[in-house]
Amino acid sequence: MLCDEENLAYAAMPKSYRKRSLLDFQKEFPTDQACAEHLVEQRWALGFNCPACGHDKFWFLEGRGLFDCKACRHQTSMTSGTIFHKTRTSLLKWYWLVYHMAMDKVGVSVAEMQRILEIGSYQTAWLMAHKVRKAMGDRDARYRLAGLVEMDESFFGPKGTTRGRGSENKATVLCAVSLYTDRKGKERPGFARMAVVSDASAATIEDFLEKLGCSAETEEGRQLMEAIRSDRWRSYGRAAKDKQLKHYKVVLREPQDAGNLLPWIHRLISNTKTVIRGSHRGVSNKHLESYLNEICYRFNRRFWERELFDRLIQACVSSAAVTYAELVGRAPTRNDC
Ligand SMILES: [Zn+2]
């Protein structure tokens, strides 16, 4: 069975991720300059590449910190086209925020980050964290789930999370974890995704399966996902049939059966519940998905813990900038970074 890592769209990229402890991090990034050098290294890991024409030779305009393409004279800064573009916050503070968001297993509190990093306002710190979460989501959107996928839905609301359908004023979240069998024949979780959806209908589940790469053809022309495992909710059966997937149904007689019969998805949901209730003290339905992206991002990279910082910087430099207005649907202000 294919493991998810094998079908990364960016598999051709060089893996130049360094393992770092907190002490390494402190030592290697004492100044903005050190961060800037690392940023350039991560952004152009294969050497400079003009965003306008793809040419690889440039003049560096030191005073303005711009890369001037020798072929088309397009000038680009190291942050343009990344989440750091036009930021008023120092790269050093960004680096510390990214470090914490990469390494803290239970997620970081924005208020805490604003305080310890002395970021101008709560709104600025919130937007910075949101941009990092967007980069995490963009990165994981490139993954496709393979093999057997365990699925379930959960309901998130201001008072926390519940299992079961029909809860009012709560956001419905579809969850999926791909599973693979290790050398000892044990089932292990591979890659997870969660999405806020309008309902748990078959059509919605099919849309979600498509986002997981279900209908996409691979280079070899075959689908990577083979089967889903879920409870007996009829929408899963219908979606599996439409998508030509095998469907394994489990019968949950008591709520606690989910822990035994759908163990991995159950663990992911309960982990998510802990993070949302704990570090983030509840999250509005509107922004819930971006927090889910953050949780999945860390879950999906749990075996590369000490490389997580470099991996996340890599995600941040390849994710386009998003403005505060785009995130919250209003005009940006001076504080937007
Ligand atoms: Zn150019």
Image (cartoon, grey):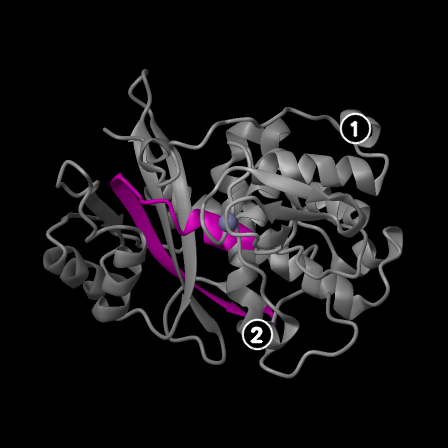
Residue type at mark 2? Glu
Kindly indicate whether the residue at mark 2 contacts the one at mark 1 (C-beta within 8 angstroms): no
Whether the residue under disc 1 has CB within 8 Å of ligand 1 = no
Q: Which residue is mark 1?
A: 28
Q: Determine if the magenta segment contains residue 150.
A: yes
Residue type at mark 1? Glu
Which dot marks residue 326? 2
Q: Is residue 1 left or right of residue 115?
A: left
How crowded pointer 2 is (Cα within 10 Å; few <14, some 14-19, many 20+) is rated as: few
Quadrant of the frame with the N terminus: top left
In this rendering, the answer to whether 301 lies above or below 197 is: above
66 or 206, which lies in front? 66
Q: Is residue 288 visible?
A: yes
Q: Position of residue 5 (x, y in %)?
A: 37, 33
Q: Look at the numbered disc 2 and give the secondary structure of its residue.
A: helix
Quadrant of residue 9 within the rendered picture: top left
Q: Position of residue 133 (x, y in %)?
A: 58, 55
Q: Earlier in the sequence, mark 1 or mark 2?
A: 1
Q: Determine if the magenta segment contains residue 75.
A: no
Quadrant of the frame with the C terminus: bottom right
Q: Give the extent of the magenta segment.
A: 135-159
Q: Look at the numbered disc 1 and give the secondary structure of its residue.
A: helix
Q: Is residue 270 visible?
A: no
